[in-house]
Image (cartoon, grey):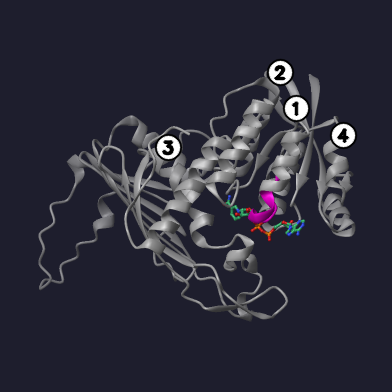
Amino acid sequence: MATQRVGIIMNGVTGRMGRIQHLARSIAAIRADGGLDVGGVRVWPDPVLVGRDLERLSRLGEAYGIERVSTDLEACLADPADTVYFDAQTTARREEALALAIAAGKDVYCEKPSATTSGAGYHLAELAEHAGVRNGAVQDKLFLPGLLKLADVTASGALGRLLAVRIEFGYWVFPDALGATQRPSWNYRAADGGGIVLDMFCHFRYLLERLFAPVEAVLCEMATHQPSRVDEVGRTYDATAEDAAYAIFRLAGGAVAQVNASWCTRPYRDDLFVIHVDGTDGSAVAGLHDCRVQPGAATPRFVWNPDETEDVTPRRSWLEVPERRPSGNAFRHQWELFLRHVVAGEPFPWDLRDAARGVEVAELAFASALERRWVDVPRTDR
Ligand SMILES: NC(=O)c1ccc[n+]([C@@H]2O[C@H](COP(=O)([O-])OP(=O)(O)OC[C@H]3O[C@@H](n4cnc5c(N)ncnc54)[C@H](O)[C@@H]3O)[C@@H](O)[C@H]2O)c1
């Protein structure tokens, strides 16, 4: 089989997402499997790991069998042999690095959010489109096993007319030294691009739009429940970004979606992320791995009677949706689609323009919370 090497500049891979999801479970995993078969050609990702600390990068490279490391991003961008730039740096650093990579003619792929403002997000999309480079941003939740099953259910029409969606996301992020390394401290500082609205609402936007219908309006309340937290080196700092958001979305077609996202909640549910959908002909509930449905014909006829201790157990009447296709790591799945897009021009709708729409919904939710009002999402197809 012929081999086609794809040189990838990977920036931010010493971080949590970059190292675990993108390097270890995606690029290194594809290499460990002998590359990616694209129409009989073996695509071989050949990364150069970029960052600030050569020693850390070298140790990381050794751990995953990658020889090329560098602290000089500009030199890497100037090398025509590496045609793809990938960014998993902290959010606030992404815009500048992506713009440099696009100007250097690289195909670009990045973590979400693509930028800290929608203006910057749409500008990056325009730059990439004018430069004619392939581009994309992570929308990993679409490729989680539970949500792939839910997508099959909604696409089949089995739920009928969509009525309402409820999303519960979150878990307890320790504010004190007990959990200092659980999530990076910049997540709780507004000036560093932190905050749960910017972090999570781009996920909610693409999930709602791709599984159900586009978001037309948002009403959001947010809170900084923990006013101070302890950082990676044990110092107490002021939390300046919101750590919880409670939102309602109006979707095209009239359905309502409610979303609770919190790093200050102790979940009592089947998963850290759960999405519940009610339709006229059935309902579905999906977590990260599983999906269950209750067809209309199997809906129990409950009668409200709090005086009886009768065993009601609503969960009993739900059916497990079986796995119809193998689903591995969600990030790897999307990386493979991006590599196919780069080498064979296969479709990749999760581009920077789509990513900017997610940043825009986050921005509008933020404005809704500050101004204490419903905010419409502009209809213009930007
Ligand atoms: N898709 C998802 O589900 C998901 C989940 C969590 C985070 N993210 C996104 O991934 C990105 C990274 O998040 P993380 O949790 O891995 O953060 P992290 O703090 O663990 O990693 C950040 C990376 O940026 C680098 N970096 C930070 N400051 C830098 C500087 N001044 N110069 C050069 N490099 C610098 C760090 O060295 C590290 O490699 C964020 O944009 C975040 O929104 C996505």
Secondary structure of the residue carrying numbered label 4: loop
The amino acid type, in three-letter code, at marker 4 is Asp
> What distance separates the C-alpha of mark 4 from that of mark 2?
28 Å
The amino acid type, in three-letter code, at marker 3 is Arg
At label 1, counting other C-alpha atoms closer than 10 Å, the crowd grade (few under 14, some 14-19, many 20 or more) is many
The amino acid type, in three-letter code, at marker 1 is Val
> What distance separates the C-alpha of mark 1 from that of mark 4?
20 Å
Question: What residue does disc 4 label?
Answer: 79
At label 4, counting other C-alpha atoms closer than 10 Å, the crowd grade (few under 14, some 14-19, many 20 or more) is few
Secondary structure of the residue carrying numbered label 1: strand
Foreground mark, 4 or 3, reads 4
Quick check: marks 4 and 2 in contact, CB under 8 Å?
Answer: no
Dot 2 or dot 3, earlier in sequence: 2
Q: Position of residue 178 (x, y in %)?
A: 62, 79
The amino acid type, in three-letter code, at marker 2 is Gly
Q: Which residues are magenta?
A: 87-94
Q: Quadrant of residue 133?
A: top right
| Left or right: residue 376 compared with residue 103 | left
Quick check: marks 2 and 3 in contact, CB under 8 Å?
Answer: no
Q: Residue at x 57, y 49 (%)?
A: 113
Dot 4 or dot 2, earlier in sequence: 2
Dot 3 or dot 1, earlier in sequence: 1
Task: Give 371 or 139, whichever is nearer the viewer.
Answer: 371
Question: What residue does disc 1 label?
Answer: 43
Question: What residue does disc 3 label?
Answer: 210
Foreground mark, 3 or 1, reads 3
Q: Is mark 1 within 8 Å of ligand 1?
A: no
Question: What residue does disc 2 label?
Answer: 40
Quick check: marks 3 and 1 in contact, CB under 8 Å?
Answer: no
> What distance separates the C-alpha of mark 4 from that of mark 3?
37 Å
Secondary structure of the residue carrying numbered label 3: helix
